[in-house]
Image: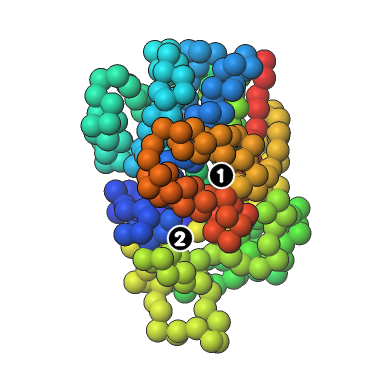
């Protein structure tokens, strides 16, 4: 997955369209009210005294920058004075995407909003922050495990014949005899803990607290879902070499692994809940009511349909989860 997604010519190394014209949907590409809920939550953190008015708002893996831009736009609508003091940061390893994000923010906000970029969390040092990420944990590299053996890939053929004690220990811990073992959660949590003295981190992704009992690794190609491991009933003409680096590849997150990584780094686990519950708790219904009072009925109806996709159980609302952590002084 590391080579597939993050090589110099990997899938995420350059601009990719997300949404109807791309390979997959995200909550960000579905409705601006996703960012609006996060903006409302940020304001509540300031009002509660957890986040300083001059704190850092940091998105990790922003891709286009649309998510953070939506957050900024809603802060402007709800509490514009905060834009004079909050600092906005994006963690993005690829320079092409950094440039796209800078251009997008410049086109959207002119010189009013300044974005600081870092290639990794290890470069950031701050006293107080709110970290946000959308669909980041499912994009970490993973090892494939099957009945005591770890996989190696030779010419796009997967062979389970490697002894790897670290992978086996993780598989035993999360009661998996097969499936994906994410690599890098521990380092990520450690770097975030060192980067800031006091923070809240919120992330949205798909998965469950407990591990799935089977492989979930899959490829998205123009909204077609292709299982990485073919069954007898699937098209044997699908070639992994044709998909390699040209499509998105992902797997279900085991949130227990994420939780343990952050707790081991000294960061407190706060909660895990379905995205629909999280967005309602953060005020999506109040934001929609505010919209209804300020726009004509046609625009409201259009935005309402988009927002519904964020919280409907049969779309993004139930399968996606919000996980939250805090580090305090």
Tell me whether the residue at label 1 lies in contact with that at label 2, contact meaning CB atoms closer than 8 angstroms.
no
* Residue 211 sits above or below residue 91 on the image: below
Mark before the other along the chain sequence, 1 or 2: 1
- Please give the name of the residue rendered at 38% of the width and 37% of the height, measured from the top-left corner: 295
Nearer the observer, 264 or 23: 23
Q: How many labels were placed on the picture?
A: 2
- Please give the name of the residue rendered at 24% of the width and 24% of the height, measured from the top-left corner: 110
* Residue 294 image point, x, y percent: 41, 32
- Please give the name of the residue rendered at 64% of the width and 17% of the height, measured from the top-left corner: 48
Res 119 → quadrant:
top left
* Residue 233 image point, x, y percent: 54, 87
Res 64 → quadrant:
top left
* Residue 129 image point, x, y percent: 53, 22
Task: Tell me if I can see residue 138 in this picture.
Answer: no
**What element does badge 2 sit on?**
strand
Label 1 crowd bin: few (<14), some (14–19), many (20+), radius 10 Å:
many
* Residue 190 image point, x, y percent: 60, 32
Nearer the observer, 289 or 269: 289
Q: Distance between the residues labelled 1 and 2?
A: 17 Å
Mark 1 or mark 2: which is in front?
1
**What element does badge 1 sit on?**
strand
Quarter the C terminus occupies: top right
* Residue 25 sits above or below residue 243 on the image: above
Please give the residue where the numbered disc 1 appears in the rendered image. 204
- Please give the name of the residue rendered at 66% of the width and 68% of the height, measured from the top-left corner: 214
* Residue 23 sits above or below residue 291 on the image: below
Nearer the observer, 284 or 213: 284
Task: Tell me if I can see residue 321 in this picture.
Answer: yes
> Which numbered marker is on residue 249?
2
């Amino acid at each position: 997955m590391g080579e597939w997604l993050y090589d110099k010519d990997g899938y995420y190394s350059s601009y990719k369209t997300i949404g109807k014209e791309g390979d997959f949907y995200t909550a960000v590409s579905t409705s601006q009210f996703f960012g609006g809920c996060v903006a409302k939550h940020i304001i509540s953190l300031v009002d509660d005294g957890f986040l300083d008015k001059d704190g850092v708002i940091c998105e990790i893996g922003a891709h286009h920058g649309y998510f953070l831009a939506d957050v900024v736009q809603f802060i402007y609508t709800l509490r514009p004075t905060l834009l004079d003091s909050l600092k906005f940061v994006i963690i993005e390893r690829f320079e092409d995407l950094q440039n796209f994000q800078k251009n997008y923010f410049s086109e959207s906000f002119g010189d009013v909003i300044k974005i600081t970029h870092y290639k990794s969390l290890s470069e950031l040092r701050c006293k107080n922050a709110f970290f946000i990420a959308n669909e980041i944990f499912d994009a970490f590299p993973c090892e494939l495990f099957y009945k005591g053996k770890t996989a190696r890939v030779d010419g796009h053929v997967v062979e389970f014949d490697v002894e790897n004690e670290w992978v086996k220990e993780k598989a035993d811990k999360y009661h998996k005899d097969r499936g994906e073992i994410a690599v890098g959660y521990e380092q990520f949590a450690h770097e975030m803990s060192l980067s800031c003295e006091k923070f809240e981190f919120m992330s949205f992704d798909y998965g469950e607290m407990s591990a799935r009992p089977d492989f979930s690794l899959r490829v998205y190609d123009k909204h077609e879902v292709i299982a990485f491991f073919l069954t007898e009933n699937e098209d044997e003409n699908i070639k992994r070499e044709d998909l390699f680096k040209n499509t998105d590849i992902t797997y279900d997150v085991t949130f227990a692994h994420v939780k343990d990584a952050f707790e081991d780094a000294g960061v407190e686990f706060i909660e895990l809940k379905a995205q629909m519950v999280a967005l309602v708790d953060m005020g999506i219904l109040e934001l929609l009511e505010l919209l209804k009072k300020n726009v004509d009925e046609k625009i409201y109806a259009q935005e309402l349909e988009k927002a519904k996709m964020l919280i409907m159980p049969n779309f993004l609302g139930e399968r996606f989860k919000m996980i939250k952590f805090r580090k305090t002084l």
